[in-house]
Amino acid sequence: MMNSAPTVASHIPQRARHGRQWRAVGWTRPLLIGAALVSTAVSLLWTAVSGFEQPRVALAFGVLVALGEFARITLPGGREAAPIATASAMSYAFLFTIIGDPVSLPSPQVVAVVAVGMGLGELPHILVGRHPQWGDLARRFLNIAVTTLLFRPLIGHIDLDGPLWWLSLLLMAAIVVVVWLADSVAAAAIRADRMRTRFGVTLRDEMRAQVAIGMAVGASAILMALSVHVMGLTTLLVFTAPLLVTQVAFRRFAQIRRTYLQTVRALSRVTEVGGYVEAGHSRRVSRLAQGIGRELGMSESTLLELEYAALMHDIGQLSLRDPIPSGATVLASPREQRSIAELGAAIIRETGVLDGVAELVRRQCEPYLGDGEAGPPPLGSRIIKVANAFDDLVGGSTDQERVDAVLQRLRMDTGHEYDPVVVEALATVLQRPDFDWRSG
């Protein structure tokens, strides 16, 4: 059977192969970085030749941008953001008067000041080895460049003291929304390539993840520009305070999220330390499950829940008096599998906040069409069932014939036990040269 087993590639649907190739192009990130470098070089050269307009104003906003970039944060999902730097830079682009005095700022100068401020803010991080995510940094810079190019040419039509003052505010708000939408598209394209998932899914994830902080940054930028119009540059620090509070809150949330995941990962190792499953089994199943979930277009929040469930899918084995040999639940009786799943779900429910994860664990042993009135189990449960069975039979082996044979065995059971769509997604994921579930 080992020698006659078909290869993985022969069973991958043609549509899936094309989709994988499209997602692996990866042109968005280098294109953004290149555009940012060209914009920086052109704006610096133009400013050096033509000279600075109102250097005191440029210094004030440049310092704020640098400080904000230095205090950048990493949001859940590995997203890098610098709310204070972005709001300060955007307000500089929106600047039209200082206490009623007109401000004439050439667009290249605005872009140059922001570029220098961002560079100075990143320099301490780079010196200690904390390099930024260059794609995210380029996106932040280009957001300001686009804002500048859209707004500065219209500066002569801005009149907040006239009867149509609200049109000026509407214009700034519209530019904020347009830039946010463009930024979400760029971020989604980068993430789709990095995570090997569908662009539509990552676009929805990015818009959900960044809508709150994006609107807060945009509103703060408009308020800062208006405050300078009324009260001068001294008000800048006052209006950065709300953003600072927001940034601290987002940082705390991200830290809690990381701590939570670390706790779940530590808990998942209890079965390994106790000798109930092979070392690394839970992490391998989790990595396989996430790869399958991305291939099937699961959202970021659903993938996180799937990761938790996959890490703790075997925790019910702690209740066994006699451990299953090698912890391979795929070789246990259906009754024993159900008992392990039920007990694991009961343990997880004790947390009081992981009921969705508990349900995925509880139904992981059911056939993919269901075995009762409850109907088919959730997709996450079907994914864990396939990933667990694959790792139980392959483990950390690097034998390709064994991998092919196990995939063939899973396909033979797709009529009842395993979801054929999930099995084919597994085959597609395993075929990727950059995917190694053994390192999970």
Image: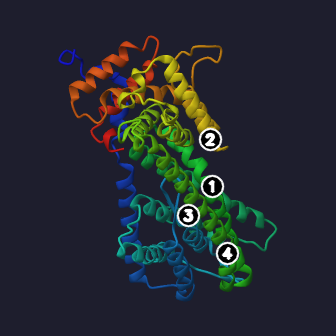
The three-letter code of the residue at mark 4 reads Ala
Q: Quadrant location of the N terminus?
A: top left
Among numbered discs 3 and 2, the one appearing first in the sequence: 3
Looking at marks 3 and 4 on the same chain, the residue that comes earlier in the sequence is marked by 3
C-alpha span from label 4 to label 2 = 35 Å
Mark with earlier residue (4, 2): 4
Q: Which dot marks residue 354? A: 2
Answer with mark 1 or mark 3, whichever residue precedes in sequence.
3
CA gap, disc 3 and disc 2: 42 Å
| Side of 199 where 92 appears, left or right | right
Residue drawn at 27 percent across, 38 percent down: 433
Marks 3 and 1: in contact by CB < 8 Å?
Answer: no
Return the residue at label 1: 177
The residue identified by callout 4 is 241
Mark 1 or mark 2: which comes first in sequence? Answer: 1
* Secondary structure found at label 1: helix
Q: Which mark is residue 147?
A: 3
Identity of the amino acid at label 1?
Answer: Val
Tell me where residue 349 appears, x and y as whole percent.
64, 38
Q: Which residue lies at the image location 43% right of the left edge and 26% below the top edge?
A: 329
Q: Using a 10 Å C-alpha cutoff, classify the residue at mark 1 as few (fewer than 14 neighbours), some (14 to 19) or many (20 or more).
A: some
Amino acid carrying mark 3 in the image: Thr
The spot of residue 314 in percent (x, y) is: 48, 34
